Amino acid sequence: MKTVKTVETIKCIENAIELINISYCYPHVEEPCLKNVSLTVQKGKFMVLMGSTGAGKTTLSLCLNGLIPQLMEGKLTGQVSVAGKNVGKTAVQSLSKVLGLVLQDPETQIIGRTVEEDTAFGPRNFLVPLDEIKQRVDQTLAKVRLKGYNHRLTEELSGGEKQRLAIAGVLVMEPEILILDEPTSELDPIGRSEIYQTLADLRRKKDLTILLVEHSSEELIHKADEVVVLNQGEVAWRGIPTELFRNLPLLRKWGIKPLPVSQLGWDFYEKGWISFAEIPLDIPSAAGVIRALLPKYGHWQGPAAGQSKDRLLKQEPFLSEKTISVQVSDLIHQYNSDQPALRGINLTIEAGEFVALIGQNGAGKTTLAKHFNGLLKPTSGEVIVEGMNTSQYDTSDLAKTIGYVFQNPDHQIFSATVEKELEFGLKNAGFKGQAIKERVEQVLQYTGLEKYRSVHPFSLGKGERQMIAVASILVLKPKLLIIDEPTTGSDWTGVQTMMALIHKLHAAGTTIIMISHDMDLVAQYAKRIIVLKDGEVFRDGTPQDVFANEQILLDSAIVPPQLCRLSSQLKDILGSETFIQSSEFTALFESGEKSRC
Amino acid sequence: MLIEYLPGDTLIHRLDVRTKMFGFLGFLILSFLFLDPKYQLLIVTLTGLLAFWIKIPLQKIWRMMLPLLPIIISIILITGFTFTPGRFERVSSQAILFYALPGGRLGATVGGFLMGTTFILRLFSMMIVSSVLTLTTSMDDFTQFFQKMKVPVELSMMLTTAIRFIPTLDKKRRLILEAQKARGAKFNEKGIVGSIRSYIPLMIPLFINSIIMANSLSMAMLNRGYGLTRSWTSMREISFAPRDYWSISCIMLLLMLAVFVRFRLHLGGL
Amino acid sequence: MDNSGTEQKDLKLSAWNVKRLSIMAIFIALSAVGALIKIPSPVGTIGMDSAPGFFCALAFGGVTGAIVIAFGHLLTSAIVGFPMTIPVHLYIALQMALWAVCYRWVNEKLGLIPAVIVGIILNGVVSSFAMLPMMGMGGVMGLLPFLVVGAALNVIISAVAYKAIKGSRLI
Ligand SMILES: Nc1ncnc2c1ncn2[C@@H]1O[C@H](COP(=O)(O)OP(=O)(O)OP(=O)(O)O)[C@@H](O)[C@H]1O
Ligand SMILES: Nc1ncnc2c1ncn2[C@@H]1O[C@H](COP(=O)(O)OP(=O)(O)OP(=O)(O)O)[C@@H](O)[C@H]1O
Ligand SMILES: [Mg+2]
Ligand SMILES: [Mg+2]
């Protein structure tokens, strides 16, 4: 008897989080959002929670700190205990001493006006003495690399800084358990790995238990101890990250983004060349695998001179026939009296191009893109789009030829049904009756939104709302489509649907300008990449050219996609070639005549 | 926006909130004491000096005043026409300039126009004083002021949060406006029905985003322990310093002088 | 921290109050932002400062709406320095609060369209006449068209928005 009891108490202490048979149903919704979830997280572990959009990740994290059921109504059954406390019987506020939750949207979590005020909010509620608060605030800000920001206004922080501040606001309460819900969704690649590094450091130093909700990331595989996959409200899989990321069919099933190198590895595995455990998850091991396999199975004759010439020819066919879509000359834009956000941009984009605009947070990507449809007017210089000088036209007139999809779909959706939402743009453009019906019908089919035709947009998920936002622009049949970060916060399935749609539009002749922080996507789809840095064009060229030099890109906080880094590791074999598609790598192993079209 | 903090280290910055509030009240009384535009001009100049002292960027003042222009004009006109001669003490003010309607109806009085000017100058001085107040006082000081005045914590939290979120919501407003313009929405339709129709696409997303924002704000506040106790640690214990007593005495003196001028010397009326 | 006594006390800290508070705070801020939205009308530009309050009355209850509309009014007039003096603005704020409650009440009893009509009459006509002691008949007549148009814009927009958002799971 006695021994059993001690074992139990030890278990109690060891488990930071314990969920037993949790089911939850949102009010006015029939389908439960969480179904019989049981989960334990040991103290000091770094756990990652993954799953497709709508799988219930956010809902689960709200159950953990008691916001469900204390703030949200609905039906909750089962037992949740956190650090030995019964969540059902403890108020959220007192739970926050042991469990810190960083929510999805940094903007609304920031309560204070200055960085210091915001960070101090938590401890002040706990009546921590002033001296100690000051000390803790300084320490915490240093931890998240916001040292010296104390008196900066929170309004003026960049997206990345806001996300750090949100983490600081929770960390300052010195929780034992930290839950973060997609804390890096809008960050540039470097910013993202910095946050992960911060988390890993914290965990090592303070023995913090971390539960991170994330769609996918290369860095996490080696930092996390365990992955839990949620699928439609149920725990679908649980285990160590490497196991999951080597298993491509599983990833596909749950809509999680696979790593490009493991995709290569999976091909080799399927061919029986390597074992499951050899499927590479990082670049050095992938390089090793390729080096080992190439002599045995490869058909690569070394960097042939003819092929690179080939590509040069491919790049610029029939230049004279192309019409110019966007012409930017000496564009300078200044928001306020301080530094200009754009400092002399010169660009020509031809009709039918697929251009990706990348660069670190605050580089000026959005600012530049807003000039293309006249939302911003040049402080000096000129922007001519489809033959129209934007300073002479109103945005609403340009809207007929230039489509602009914003990052946040919630800024434009206002109708009670999806169908009406799509009609809005057409009515503005002066279309009538039957013409509107036809176009809406067409676009509903094109985007796969037919089934939601008469549904309220706000009862749909974020991915679908993003699609509605795109569709509401597509009805206007723009010649030039600008898309600002179309895939943030979407799961892999959503990303692929969206990109397939954009690709289809591009193939049909629409000029595409896409802003993105997802380098894998950029490399895969764009034909031309423009890197902005501090309001200037830093690089401009094909993905191969731009991603070739890792060191230089680091300056503008960009990490080239995994496959590019892989090919630069293999320089001695591949020569000066930079591969960006996985098909290019697999072609190494295919017979000579089929290689690289 | 007005609700900003202008970092600086002038005397006004360092004064206690209560002193500043008293000063604010003083100016309020001062500007309501006098009806004559000449005296109002003096007050505006005084407040202008204060503004100059804390170095308010001129640009900011202009941006603040510009949208008020239509209101200013309408105030002058409305008071000019609606203040009947009987309301003025002085004969010169009772003079009627002209009639807007035939048959001697709706007359514009000299006093009315003077009164209108006073209203506007009063508006200016109030605007300047309140921006001096808000620009030199941190939110925390205001919260403490509420606390000292025994305002319930919920109320002061609600107001400070509201003020904190004005710039955020204003940014949302701009983003929504841009998003709708990019879909071809026009915001210049005529008539009441037209303007309702053209502003619906702005207002609905604004309401929706506010609800979403309020939801996550309540989560964030609970997450960080708000409501655990009905009070919280003050970041800076406010206290009176000698400069506060000096300032209060100065303001008192000024007020007494003003009362004397107005009611004993009967100056500054209309 | 772990005895049952504190646990009992803990649960009394209602999360709902915090939710109400943040809704009110955000919508008060929205009133101030609404005042910056200048809608041209035949009688001059009109702000959207009371629409958030009316909307709250419909969506979250009369008391919430009343608080939002009253403090929204006080905050917006504070930003421009109380152009009509603090007592008058307090008086207006109280009136507005009352109208918000009536608006909600009529909506529940008779429906949205009667509520809109009542809202416009109260906030446009009755409010104008409530200024009689301060401005005289001339003032009331000058104010009337401005207030009626303003009330119409604000009330109608709040009603349309409520109808459009009601179908989703946001409220
Ligand atoms: N307030 C709500 N009322 C009703 N249903 C909701 C509510 N919030 C979320 N849901 C639904 O519950 C499900 C799970 O949502 P949740 O936000 O937990 O997903 P998630 O895994 O966090 O997704 P994402 O990756 O998009 O953040 C979804 O189908 C969503 O539509
Ligand atoms: N409305 C504005 N007023 C003042 N400054 C602004 C405004 N919008 C952007 N800026 C500033 O201009 C610069 C460029 O901003 P921009 O939004 O174009 O960056 P971005 O490249 O789109 O970044 P992100 O990847 O974070 O979206 C930043 O320093 C930003 O702070
Ligand atoms: Mg989520
Ligand atoms: Mg951007």
Image (cartoon, rainbow, N blue to C red):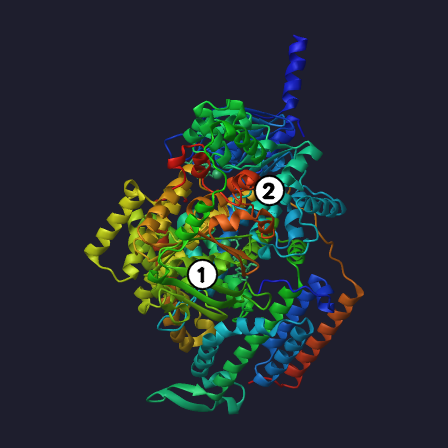
Q: What secondary structure is found at the residue carrying circle 2?
A: helix
Mark 1 / mark 2, whichever is N-terminal: 2
Give the residue displayed 56% in from the left and 35% down from the top. A283
When asked about the image quadrant of residue A206, the answer is top right
Cα gap from disc 1 to disc 2, whole angstroms: 28 Å
Count of marks overlaid on the render: 2
Q: In the image, residue B55 lies at what x, y percent?
A: 66, 72
Q: In the image, residue B49 lies at what x, y percent?
A: 67, 77
Residue placed farthest to the right in the image?
Answer: B242
> Badge 2: how crowded within 10 Å, few (<14), some, or many (20+)?
some
Q: Amino acid at mark 2?
A: Ser
Q: Amino acid at mark 1?
A: Lys
Name the one closer to the observer, A120 or B265.
Answer: A120
Give the residue displayed 47% in from the left and 77% down from the top. B75
Residue placed farthest to the left in the image?
Answer: A434
Task: Specify the label residue A193 is tagged with.
Answer: 2
State the residue position of label 1: A370
Query: Would the CB of label 1 be found within 8 Å of ligand 2?
Result: yes
Disc 1 chain ID: A
B127 over A61 or under it: above or below: below
Q: Is residue A149 left or right of residue A302?
A: right
> Badge 1: how crowded within 10 Å, few (<14), some, or many (20+)?
many
Residue placed farthest to the top in the image?
Answer: A1
